[in-house]
Amino acid sequence: MKKKSLVGALASAALVASAVLVPSAHAANKTIIVWADDQRGPALKKIIDGNTTIAKGYVVKVSTYANYDALDGAWQKATAASGPDIMFNPVGDGVRYGKSGKVLPLFLSSHAKSVFSKTALKYGQYQGKQYALPLDLDTTSMYWNTKFGPVPTTFAELAAAFKTAKAAGTATVGFCAGDGTWGALPFLTAMGGGAWGVKANGTPDIAKNNFANKALATNINKYALGSDGKSNGLFAWDGWDGCGQAWLAGKALAINTGSWRLDATKTAKIAYSIQPTPTVDGTGLSHQWTGFGGAWISTFADDHQVSVGARKVIAYLASEEGALAYAKATGRPSPNTAITSSLSSDVQGFANAGAKNGYVQVDALLGDSTGGSNWYDVLDATFKDIFNNGKDALTTLNKGAKILAADWASGITKL
Amino acid sequence: MHKVFGSNFGLVVKLLFLSSFTALFTWMTYLAILKSEWAIAVALIVIIIAANYIYMSKKPVAGKFLLPGVVFLILFMIVPVIYTTYMSGFIYKAGNIITKEEAIHQIITNTGMQPDENNTTYDMVLGTVGSKYTAILTDQTSHQVYLGQDGIAKALSAGQYHLNADGIADSVPGFKAYDDNQLAAADQQISTTKESLGNNRYILAQDAQTAALFIQTLTYNAKTNTLLNPVDGTVYIDGGKGYFVNKDDATQRILPGWRQPTWFSNYTSIFTNSKLRDPFIRVFLWTFAFAFITVIMMFGVGLILAIALDKKIKFRNMYRALLILPYAMPSFMSILIWAGMLNRDYGSVNTLLGHHIDWLGQVWLARGAVLLVNLWLGFPYFYLISTGAIQALPADLEEAAAIDGASGPQIFWRIKLPLVLQILSPMLIASFAFNFNNFNLVYLLTRGGPTNVLGGETAGGTDLLITYAYKTAFATNDQNYGLASAISVVVFVIVGAISMWSLRRSRVLEDMR
């Protein structure tokens, strides 16, 4: 047995030695660890994974998480031992990330500051410092199925076209919020409602609560409810797995969604045109949430002694070359205005929509800050009560507005 | 079998496995040490030593079987429980994520460093003069050149430096500029470059080529544990709640904060804060009812089917195979399919019924749906174990009872059921504990809803304590992990207590037998 044990010990020792020696043999470049979600990760793999030239002396390694929640969960638990050096996440998380103390301020060149959308940059700031570099624009627009006729110039026309198509049995949905309650703002604003107001300088005006008003309630009653006081099918907000499937089946006249549904729409052979959602009477603009995906440098980059390299990677992504490579790889509009003309016409359409009538998605206001509920759940509950349960529109909207006002009052102090 | 593993071949296979295991764990230890994760490194070393001793020695036979289980038990059960309990004693939420040391470091280097009002920026060339790390800094606006060494920025006059074609100072006498590899190697040095201009003004490197002027607006005094704003003299003290706060106005906080020990306040808030207490009690009652009813239902249906198929009937094997199918399918798929089937507008259930019933949108219907779907997912398991238990009952018991004149129902209720219950008690208790925390079912089917949001409810009609804890941790802007940990510990204590009580009770029954 002693002999056998000796053999075992020697074999173990040999493998241990190899395990320790092999990694130390290829430790030349310092590694910059990048974390991203399933949307940005594959694109980043194409453009920066394994790169050793953007930041000489460093190699970039991209890790992709299954979805945003998984990424955010890992980030919350991350320590210096496990955390990334660069993180790709919604810029709207600026406040939460800024106050976490886990991200470093960025220093953007004056050129970058001049070509990036001011609004996009603003929402990557916290207490006056830039923490996130905005890289992609998450915004939506209305896809119109042209088999139902020319694009309506008012929402009233859209409602009339739906009435005709429904009677003919060719449509089940008029206007689909293809991304659930997040994508339902164009319906609200087209019908005369909305969220908070916006001041001249582009910042939220929470004193103005557009969620509940008589015009919105009247228009909902007039166009979107049937004789039983419940939904007539004009509006659906159950997202891609719900009314989105009706869109793909050619049974929905219009869907409000982003560039991420272009491929599916083309594959389903839907003839479409893209434009903003028209307002009920064709005057003014409807609005949709506009979020930004972006990059952050974590404090772990300092711990890992790669923060200078990480800043070079950020500088590359802020450059026209880097921003264009990123935009082409993700297929999303870019907040870098210098490259807009180099993108496809569809993507440009979304970029223009975002610039023209996008409302910046301020997560600190949209989230639950009072221990009550958030914008998305309030909207869902409001729509359910009005459209499914047949409750009075104005009374229901007023209830929702009260909760939202409390959230906004609390959230605005955290900006 | 004995020949194979008792021979040299067996020894070689064992050595191969053990060596590979040792190499893998040593590699992990090496990484843990590199990242200064000492507790993990020590734990891995202990596991390596224990595994080599136990599997290379003849004596600890039981240990050979127990070691993997014990290691996994510690790693995946005991450590998370301890960690969760530990975290429940902290103010641990958005803004209070890092340690106090890390927070002070961030406050001094980031929060307390404000760019000067002109956003003064410098072109920077890094290198050495002699062996001294040196930064040559050129003000992009005024073109004044500074020499940064030993934390001091010294203004240079014309003639003391060399300008390149772009008008940037790139050399001084004796200066040797870093190349790319040297810059990469000096990463930490660069990121901490801080050259004083006096009067609380510092030039900080922003990357390898650029620096900017900052005003130090907060300094930390370790002796008094206070922050001072040297510009306006404001003093910030440790407010005891994970933040430095203005000495004269506690509402003025400095961010980031830190994880502050808070002992039992997260626990007490569950029961004293009405915003938490009221939904907690409602969710607790439903959780208890759900776990109890679902186990009874699954056991009842499983047992009935087991009894029905205990008789020799035609196509019995086919029926048995069909009954196992729901169990063979990944549960998350089944739940999502059920969620689709129960959809108010597009679901096949409503299509078949020709109605628009909001199965998942009305509280009691949603609760019924949750129970129904869980019955679908769980009855095959109870069918299987009930079949096993029934088949394990001695046949002569039934015969003897029949001879004594017992009727079929009497045999079932008075003989078979008590014996089956005795055999299956541990499984029923385990199932109760599992369903008490059946996160997947509720989250995938109803997301805890429906919630009367407009009525001010914060917990949904089908929320279990575990989904409520999840929402508490992740669904609000505050992301209160400390409170969610406290709720999780309460759940653990409740489930543990009920399980222990039930196990003891079942042992009493066993003794009675």
Image: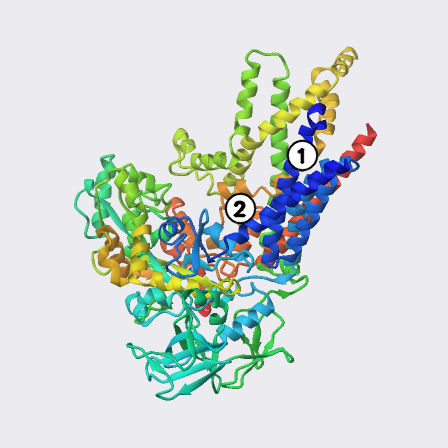
Q: Residues within 10 Å of mark 2 (few under 14, many from 20)?
A: many
**Residue B363 versus residue B136 in the image, above or below:** above
- The amino acid on which the numbered mark 1 sits, given as a three-letter code, is Lys
Q: CA distance from mark 2 to mark 1?
A: 54 Å
Residue B383 percent across, percent down from the top left: 61, 25
**Residue B434 versus residue B85 in the image, above or below:** above
Seen at 82% across and 31% down, the residue is: B511
**Residue B58 versus residue B237 in the image, above or below:** above
Residue B457 visible, this angle:
no
Do tag 2 and tag 1 residues touch (Cβ < 8 Å)? no
* In this rendering, position of residue B158 left or right of residue A103: left
The picture quadrant where one finds residue A185 is bottom left
Q: Secondary structure at mark 1?
A: helix
Residue B503 visible, this angle:
yes
* In this rendering, position of residue B94 left or right of residue A397: right
Residue B336 percent across, percent down from the top left: 46, 37
Of residues B465 and B222, which is closer to you in this image? B222
* In this rendering, position of residue B401 left or right of residue B154: right
User: Seen from this angle, which residue lies furthest bottom?
Assistant: B157
User: Seen from this angle, which residue lies furthest left?
Assistant: A150
Instruction: Identify the residue under disc 1.
Output: B14
